[in-house]
Amino acid sequence: MNRFFITFIIIFPLTDIFGEEQTIYLMNGQILRGEVIKQTGTSMQIKTTDGKVRQLNKAEIQRVTYKEPSAKELKESEERLKQQAQNDNPTKTVPEKPAEIIPEKKPDPPKKSDPSFSHTKRHDIEFFAGIGYGFYKPNSENFLIEAQNRLSILFGTNPSISKKPSYHTDLSDQLGINYTFKRFSGSLSGNNFRGTTTTSYLGLNSGTEFSTIGGTYPEKQSSLRADVSYLAFSNDRFDLKATLGYSEFWGSTDDKSTSVKAFSSSGLSLYGQYSFTISERLRGPSAGIKATIRLGERIENRIEIHSLELKGTQDLTTHAKIFSDSASPIYGEFSQAIGWKAYGVYFDYKFVYKLTPIFSVWLGASIYNWQYSVHHYSLEQKYAFEAPASIPNAALLEDLLQEQIVKGAASVSKSEAILFGFIFRFDLANQN
């Protein structure tokens, strides 16, 4: 998926979309309607509706919008210009003319101005949502096998051999809100990653005895992120924000299909079914950057990169029901509890196309990736039959050895989704 995403960015043509008429409101009250044909950090060149080309200083501009001016705005502009003309020369009256064809006033010499005026003065709110396909790749099942293998080596038994899990995509989604006021902004967003995992393990009991475990089951991860950002740099084409946030994650696995089979020299000796549930919860702070790259008046590339520092727990419970030819069913239960520390990265990209000043569509990718380290670990085994009583001190020593050995096992988690969605943007600065 990463290779597809990088290729998508490289091959997508970085060209401006054709021009479209816009409305330019000047500081002196004048309203112009025309196509922006060229602009720099301090000036803008437009072609008005009557075919004239006009050069404007950005210091003269109050705001720019795609909307056509209302009749009320045109009337107010006309009255304001007439009043200004009368104040300048009370003995003369100015004939009524449409705002767009008022004789062009020679621009003043360029004044020092902030080239990012239209972005540092923003006051708006955005609602966005997307849906697509993705997957959740926890390492929970493999970690259990790896942990047990380490303990098997410690206590002199044979380890299990695990086949690399296969993952299948499923519907995933994203939902969020952005609020911006001048250079400050706040965001609240959530993701749901869903997928299906298939695993297979082989256990070697002796030279002639072995067992297999395998199954397919659904997995899901949900995330919730809140962050605040400061616009550190901005110009006509590029914005860069510094961001601090806090994230929380919920992961779940619910397996009811895994089967187990044991073979000896005489053939199938045991068979049965495993069902297990895994629940995980992580939370912690994040820090990163958000960047917006504008291409023309309609296209935006929005990029977010955040580092994550998380802590949390994972609980796994496995129920087993085993049958043999010569005995009644054996019921068993494993309970595993882990305390995690995790460090990772969150990456989000959106290619945004503005259909109107209010409504946009986007195509993008959302990726979480982190590596765990074990903070604490415990494994409890229960059976229907009575196990030999343990010596208390020996049991305590075994628990301590288990925890120290398992702490060396590695675990990673990854969530990815390709999404298509929409954005509704409401400009609060012009609601008065």
Image (cartoon, rainbow, N blue to C red):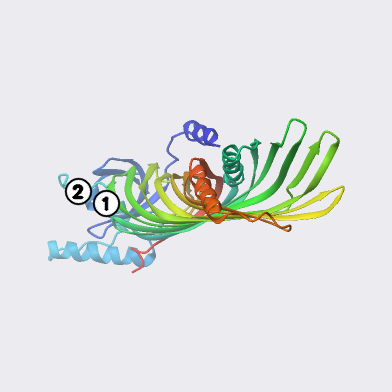
Tag 2 secondary structure: loop
CA neighbours of label 1 inside 10 A, class few (<14), some (14 to 19), many (20+): many
- Residue 391: x %, y % from top left: 58, 54
Identify the residue at horizontal 24%, vertical 65% (top origin). Answer: 80
Identify the residue at horizontal 38%, vertical 43% (top origin). Answer: 294
Q: Would residue 330 be found to the left or right of residue 71 on screen?
A: right
Residue 312 seen in render: yes
Q: Are marks 1 and 2 in contact (CB under 8 Å)?
A: yes
Circle 2: residue type: Ser
- Residue 233: x %, y % from top left: 27, 46
Q: Which mark is residue 2?
A: none
Which residue is under mark 2? 113
Using the image as rendered, state which of residue 120 and residue 139 is in the foreground. Answer: 139
CA neighbours of label 2 inside 10 A, class few (<14), some (14 to 19), many (20+): few
Circle 1: residue type: Phe
Q: Residue furthest bottom?
A: 432
Image quadrant in which you'd find residue 212: top right
- Residue 223: x %, y % from top left: 50, 55
Residue 349 seen in render: no
Q: Quadrant of the C terminus?
A: bottom left
Identify the residue at horizontal 38%, vertical 65% (top origin). Answer: 71
- Residue 213: x %, y % from top left: 72, 42
Across the whole image, how many numbered discs are drawn on residues? Answer: 2
Position above or below: 293 against 340: above
Tag 1 secondary structure: helix
Which residue is under mark 1? 117
Q: CA distance from mark 1 to mark 2?
A: 8 Å
Using the image as rendered, state which of residue 13 and residue 225 is in the foreground. Answer: 225
Image quadrant in which you'd find residue 252: bottom right
Identify the residue at horizontal 44%, vertical 34% (top origin). Answer: 14
Using the image as rendered, state which of residue 90 and residue 3 is in the foreground. Answer: 3
